[in-house]
Amino acid sequence: MTQRVFNLADLFEVVVDACPDRLALVAGEVRLTYRELDERANRVAHAFASAGLAVGDHIGVYSRNRAEWLEAMIGAFKARMVPININYRYVEEELRYIVDNADLAALVVERGYLPKVAAVRADAPALAHVFVLADEFDEKLDDTVDYEAALAAESGARDFEQRSPDDRYMVYTGGTTGFPKGVEWRSHDIFCSAMGGGNFGGEPITDPELLADKAQGAPLVQMLTTPLMHGNGQWVTWITLLSAGTAVLWTGLRYDPAEILRAVEREGCVTMMLVGDAMARPIADALESGDHQVETLKVIGSGGALLSPSVKAQLTRLVPGLYIADSFGASEFGAGSSQTPGGRFPLKPKTAVLGEDLRPVGVGESGRIARTGYIPIGYYKDPVKTADTFHVDPDGVRWVIPGDFARVEDDGDVTLLGRGSVCINTGGEKVFPEEVEGVLKAHPAVYDTVVVGVPDARFGERVAAVVSLRPGHTLTTEDLAEHARGRLAGYKIPRDLVTVAEVPRTPAGKPDYRWAKATAVAALSG
């Protein structure tokens, strides 16, 4: 037997060997034990190798949530290849960019997306292999391989070479503020940073075999609603599996809060993972109906976008004893800390708020949240962006600084202010949209909102709110200002209101600030 190292495939196999017959994955109608998931991932790895793919090759996964997404990811790691997430909402030009930028040698793709693959394939000579997943569509493409047929022809045995903790993990991030970027990690670093390190909240484990201890207790059953095509969805799934839990993966074609709650009831889920109000508010509204009995649900976690106080209050009222773990993080940073009841975040070890001189700022001062230690290598094929985000301080310590601003409070905790790239500068004052959005969402007429800056002749920019309303409600700018007065400084209160039927979000629930700004500017200039 090869020596186990801090490689994601090795770590997964430690858990498999400790609890082979435990239920690992529920994905729609598919139910797989750890042994079954491991065997199918072994077949995937062998299929990749049989196709001629080599160690280090990049394999795109272009699919909605389903069991095969996870199988392909684990199989790639087993074969020492690199799975690449592809947003299933991409149009042809975006797909062409990711295929080229990520140097894809193969695709695992749902049949319904084959027309887009056909449109870009001629410009991608390195894309030599396409494995097709069956879905509700009947699209076809020449020179492809049926995924299930490929697996059926391979062995389910583990007979792989020694792996390395340096084997790569990569996640493509963004697209709302520019072209997506591939954040490249060592396997060991992503495990210790974003995937809990085998001891979530504490120091990472020092021996891969210690993960077997997680299988001694009852499995933690987690409802995972976020897409695997995003880092947050991947991380919470890996945390579940490496904790010997049961991952209940939402596979619906649309976000259906009632069906998600029925799955929580049916599977006895203890936790539910969401991203921000876009996912949490519909869950809370569905619970208001009284049709769902979720006695097993003890924790709701949110990462990638913070929950507003009004949504938190609604959820805790509807689910007695519920604990809400509201966390921040980034694809370049990993998982940050969870919010305290007072709305602040404790700084974890190896994190700090740094000023422009790359030194920690003082109490009451603001700067950018940074992390050292287990951090990425950088952005794939982009030394310029890597240099903009990864910095070495005067003492020779390397930090990742994604751009989230925070203020240090007198107790040492920090208050998140928001991402600098969407910060509004109005008359020299900085306004972070997330703070304003949290206040506005507490208004009874507001269902969802995104706050942006629009051009202003006097102040450079002024604050505008793009809002979708609850059914049967109306709202004026004066109503919104009256609601915000006393909760926000005057310069943070929206001067303009633009109502829309729906505030679009990414599949991971994050706001599209480019869309919101364009919508606001167009409406206010008309």
Image (tube, rainbow, N blue to C red):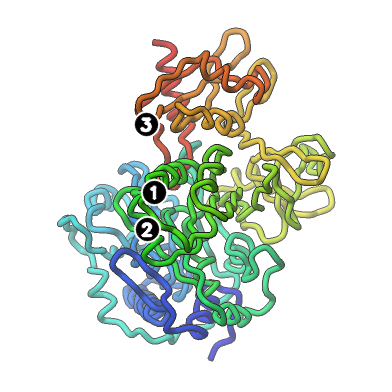
Viewer-nearest of discs 3 and 1? 1
Residue 477 placement (x, y as % from top left): 50, 15
Residue at image mark 3: 502
Residue type pointed to by label 1: Gly
- The residues bearing labels 3 and 2 have C-alpha atoms spaced at a distance of 23 Å
Few, some or many residues within 10 Å of mark 2 (<14, 14–19, 20+)? many
Asked whether residue 329 appears in the rendered view, the answer is: no
Tell me where residue 65 sits by quadrant.
bottom left
Q: Residue furthest top?
A: 458
Picture residue at 29% right of the left edge, 51% below the top: 253
- The residue wearing badge 2 is 250
Which circle, 1 or 2, is nearer the viewer? 1
For numbered disc 2, what is the local secondary structure?
loop
Image x and y of residue 387, in percent: 65, 45
Can you say whether 231 is above or below 313 in the image?
below
Q: Is residue 14 left or right of residue 189?
A: left
Q: Point out the image quarter for the C terminus.
A: top left
- Alpha carbon distance from label 1 to label 2: 22 Å
Secondary structure under the numbered disc 1 in the rendered image: loop
Q: Residues within 10 Å of mark 1 (few under 14, many from 20)?
A: few
Query: Does any portion of residue 116 appear in the rendered image?
Result: yes
Q: Is residue 105 above or below residue 343?
A: below
Crowding around mark 3 (Cα neighbors within 10 Å: few <14, some 14 to 19, many 20+) is few
Type of residue at label 3?
Answer: Glu
Q: Judge left or right: residue 396 versus residue 9.
A: right
Mark before the other along the chain sequence, 1 or 2? 2
- Residue drawn 66% across the image and 79% down it: 207
The one nearer the camera, 23 or 363, is: 23
Which residue lies at the image location 80% right of the left edge and 54% below the top edge? 396
Q: Secondary structure at mark 3?
A: loop
Name the residue carrying label 1.
290
Q: Position of residue 2 (x, y in %)?
A: 55, 88
